[in-house]
Amino acid sequence: MKTLIIALGGNALIRLGEEGTVGQMLDNLRAPIRQIAELSKDYQVVITHGNGPMVGSLLLQQEAALHVVKMPLQILVAETQGQIGFMIESTLDEELMKIGLDEEKLFLTILTYVKVDPEDPAFKNPTKPIGPAYPVRTQLGQVKTTKGWRRVVPSPKPKKIYQWREIKKLMELGSWIVIACGGGGIPVIKEEKRLYGVEAVIDKDLASSKLAEQIGADILLIATDVEKVALNYGKPAQNDLERLSISEAKKYLEEGQFPAGSMGPKIQAVINFLETGGKKAIITSIEKIKEALEGKAGTQIILDK
């Protein structure tokens, strides 16, 4: 079977306007996880996921609690890997039982850490939105997104997924659904044969693309809050795209059609994936994962002829 990486955006857990309670997050996971359970009949599946809303909330909790020892951002990323991994696993278990695959399919959340360059310019230019969105700017270090003003933190490029061998081995066994690269992975640097965590949040789409490259995945599907990639997004002349070639994607990215805080990293991720041997790349909504794989929804990103 082909190996499929499905990268779930933060809206798979918390929708716009929601508080982000456990009940809301579990309810929101049902739509994508139901489709993933069905797809596991035909694909070897790796699930990756974002953590922007959750890791931002943890950071706010720390800042509000004066008598609690503060943890660095990389530790909070690790916390969200376990937190979200548990919610995905419990939902996946129920959905597999519903279709009678609970005896056939096994699943596992892998604590994943990712190599970054300590000299990455991102450390001096934070761009990664995390935490809640505010209707107005409330502090320095925020960026305007389609959802409102959000806090930003450094987001260095992923250089290597350290657990890629373990993930690839599980894929070869044929019965595993793996949850990995949670929140883009725990950012680490290597110095004298030792790994050190650094305060940053890696983009989960770029990390997913790097993982896909390392394990030789066939398909990368990025699930977000819109069904298709669009030009002039949110404007009267918005143009939803069914297909997008790599050369077109690069051109529109350079023109600023795909902002750094939203669609930009997704487009760069699929470009990276296809240029390093990937066979198929799709961007679509959380609700349309299965349809997009069947060619009935989403934006298909294709190699130039």
Image (tube, rainbow, N blue to C red):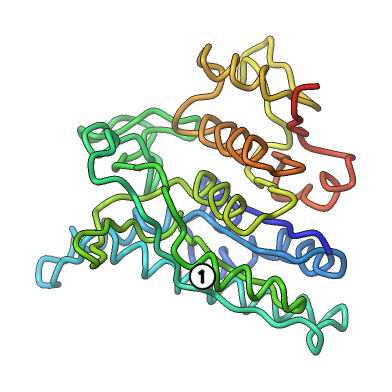
Front residue of this view, candidates 7 and 224: 7
Task: Residue at 57%, 39% (x, y): give it.
Answer: 269
Task: Residue at 59%, 78% (x, y): give it.
Answer: 108
Mark 1 sits on what residue? 22
Task: Residue at 83%, 82% (x, y): give it.
Answer: 101
Position of residue 209 relative to residue 127, above or below, is below
Image location of residue 289, percent across then percent down: 77, 50
Name which quarter of the figure residue 197 lies in.
Answer: bottom left
Count of marks overlaid on the render? 1
- Label 1's element? helix
Front residue of this view, candidates 161 and 262: 161
Furthest residue in direction bottom, as rendered: 103
Image location of residue 63, percent across then percent down: 18, 58
Of the 4 image quadrants, the one containing the C terminus is: top right
Position of residue 16 relative to residue 265, above or below, is below
Name which quarter of the figure residue 248 lies in.
Answer: top right
Front residue of this view, candidates 226 and 169: 169
Mark 1 nearby-residue class (10 Å; few <14, some 14–19, many ≥20): few
Q: Is residue 158 left or right of residue 175?
A: left
Furthest residue in direction left, as rendered: 67
